[in-house]
Amino acid sequence: MNDISQKDSNSAKGSDLILPLLPLRDIVVFPEMVAPLFVGRAKSVNALSEAMNKDKNIFLSAQKNASVDIPEKDDINEMGTIGTVLQLLRLPDGTVKALVEGKQRATISRYLQSGDFFQVEVDAVVEPPVSTVECEALTRAIVQSFEEYATLNKSISKDLTRNVSSISNASLLADTVATHFSFKLEDKQKLLETIKVEDRLSMLLSLIKVEMDIFKMDQRIKGRVKEQMEKTQRNYYLNEQIQAIKKEMGSEDSGVDEIQELEQRIENKKMSKEATEKAIQELKKLKMMSPMSAEATVVRNYIDWMLCLPWFENSDIHDDLDQAENILDEDHYGLKKPKERIVEYLAVQALVKKVRGPILCLVGPPGVGKTSLAKSVARATGREFIRLSLGGVRDEAEIRGHRRTYIGAMPGKVIQSLKKAGVNNPVFCLDEVDKMSMDFRGDPSAALLEVLDPEQNYSFNDHYLDVDYDLSDILFITTANTLPEIPLPLQDRMEIIRLSGYTEYEKYRIATDFLVPKQIKQNGLEGYKVNFSKNALLMVIQRYTREAGVRNLEREISAVCRKIAKEIVKDKEKKGADISTTSVQKYLGPPRFRQSQLEDEDKIGMVTGLAWTQVGGELLCIETLLMPGKGALTVTGKLGDVMKESAQAALSYVRSRSDSLMIDQKFYRKFDIHIHVPEGAIPKDGPSAGVAMCTSLVSTLTKRPVHRDVAMTGEITLRGRVLPIGGLKEKALAAHRGGIKKIIIPKDNEKDLRDIPSVILKQVEIIPVEHIDEVLAHALIMEEGDTLFKRDDMPHIGVMSGNAEHPQVPLV
């Protein structure tokens, strides 16, 4: 039986045919298979044209290597399919679309000479008879496998499945099924070259089993990726698919190296015990997560924050007191009290190696050097410097951080700044601490209570980190313009150091030592001789600026330097400039302020009071007029309720003492009184103008002028007592700037005279008083032989020496 089959196989050859050859790429055409082909190579197009011109028959054979553009004889498989060209369509780009149908297997016996295309002589292959039982079994297995595959692959229609099941020819069934599977090109070519049907069916069944396993594997991978994609973002789909494939293949996870690196960093990082345990716990969670999940990113960022913080890293603190004093003096002129406090801290640090950092609050008007002093402290102590501006901060999370449950959560600004500094003992400047506000998100000033409390900040708990962090080694310095804007509990945790305004002499020294060299350098004048005379600088200070600090002074000096730079650029011969008072007016224009704010002459009802503002002290002019009327009191100048009440109290006192002051007791029935405080657009309030208002009233009612070089401050009671006030130093500086020669203050404020610079005490006479009668005696001008009070009613005037116009009171 086998001998007959072998004989049939060897003799199963058809008659020789001469046909044009069409080499195929990436496709094998089986008998009874219809396939569309896109043909672009010249020889292939010519071969199709030759077939169309004759009987439309053509030989279809696959290339051994699809990447070969110009195949030779050795590049083409010998076994192929005799086919018929059903349709031919020439496209505009020169390519051809052909629809071909395979008819019968054939082999190339020889190539014929043809220049324009391949022409071959082929031998048609006649298939041998099949074994009915074996073939039937294989056929059923293939049909069953195809139907199973069709249930998995939704792209195979039910009609195709029915058509395949109805095929009775085993050879045709094998070729049809092979057509609808995406086997490798080599496997399809082997199926085509297998002439014996039983062998072809057996090979096909094996290939189908392998293809179904691959398809099921692919479906499992896609299903796993889809589940993960539903939990995370769709953007991770491709990456997850790659990870799933790697996992199925048993390859190593890409996140292992990163986890090992984090584990090594945790082992090497010196952290607190609580922080180390927390980091290890989070790392265990990270190991259980997919590397590309959103939660893994959150955990990874948290661990990275923990490892980047300076838990025990610190900078060496300089304890050389002389060097520290020299650095502080180099950077700032004056500011004796804050410098003394810093040096005291360094002295304690030298004696006690572990001392909790002090919390200082520098309060003063803008431009007096609060922030730059904090930077200078860092340089003097050898610490890193961090500055955090709190102006406009209204969210508690800015200080304490966000909890990790929020998207994009981060630690608070305190922890962020420490990470940036890299040490845990810097100088931390909390700028503009009085400019914080609060809303529905919380109160940041309340969050600062823990940060700025030496008894609590050793265990500061940031919401993001959720572990205690030690802030006790940090030297906190806060700055503010006004103290009342800072909540009292926060004030209680800080040591308040006031920085008042500068005197004219201090401004001159600051301009000479700091501002002029700085502006010469910034404006490119270092190589030129630019000299400011003393009178020029004093003129800028007195007549172009009116401030407690030196910011505007620096701007004016900068303006002069810019104009000099402009002249030097235009005139190449110019080598510098000597700045005199004439030059100042040339560069800056007419003076903006009078040299003195005093009135030209002593006037009735016009008194100079003293006021405190956020930018320092100011002179306050108070005017009073009498008009015929019925005793109405009018107070103008945008005054607050407290100031209006002071005016009413002053009037009540004057009425009660009208007989002693020799004033018509019925004046309030004959006259209306108008008290006005100029610069009416500026709000004013407070009780310290009480004595000035009372003096103005008495001056108007007694027709006695007031000394124009006398300024006064103090609250008045209905009994005439003068009560203490605040801001005496700022008010004294303002009086000195305005040319005042004598300042009347409450006696209870004598203790504050120690804060006033000695240069002012030498040039301005300070008169402490207890009662308004003493104020009137010093302020009002009386002619010779005149008296203010009745002789039998002068109990409130102390014993004084000197003439009545300028009684002498000893300075404290």
Image (cartoon, rainbow, N blue to C red):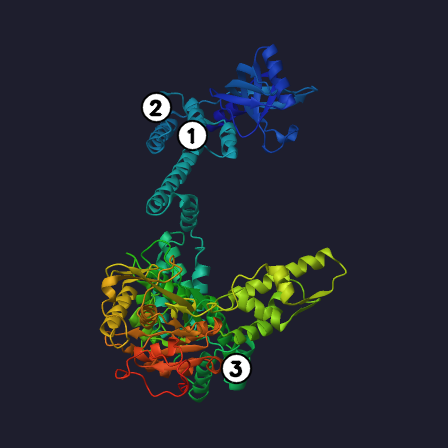
Q: Nearer the viewer, mark 1 or mark 3?
A: 3
Amino acid type at circle 3 is: Ala
The residue at 34%/29% (across/down) is 147
Query: Could you tell me which quadrant the C terminus lies in?
Result: bottom left
Helix, strand or loop at label 2? It is: helix
Question: Which residue reaches farthest front?
Answer: 785
**Percent x, y of residue 108:** 60, 23
Give the image quarter of residue 537. Answer: bottom right
Whether residue 338 is visible: yes
Identified at 43% across, 30% down, the residue is 181
Q: Mark 1: few, some, or many residues within 10 Å (few <14, many ≥20)?
A: many
Amino acid found under the numbered disc labelled 1: Leu
Q: Considering depth in this image, is 446 or 59 the residue closer to the camera?
A: 446
Q: Quadrant of the N terminus?
A: top left
> What is the CA distance from the residue labelled 2 to the residue labelled 1?
15 Å
Pointer 3: what residue? 324
Of the pair 171 and 390, the residue shown nearer to us: 390
Farthest right residue? 573
Q: Position of residue 247 (x, y in %)?
A: 41, 51
Q: Is residue 148 above or below residue 361?
A: above
Q: Amino acid at mark 2?
A: Ser
Res. 397 image quadrant: bottom left
Give how far across and how far down residue 810 sits, in percent: 40, 87
Q: Which mark's residue is nearer the viewer, 3 or 2?
A: 3
The residue labelled by disc 2 is 165
Q: Please state which of residues 745 and 462 is positioned toward the viewer in this rendering.
A: 745
- For marks 2 and 1, the one nearer the N-term is 2
Label number found at residue 201: 1
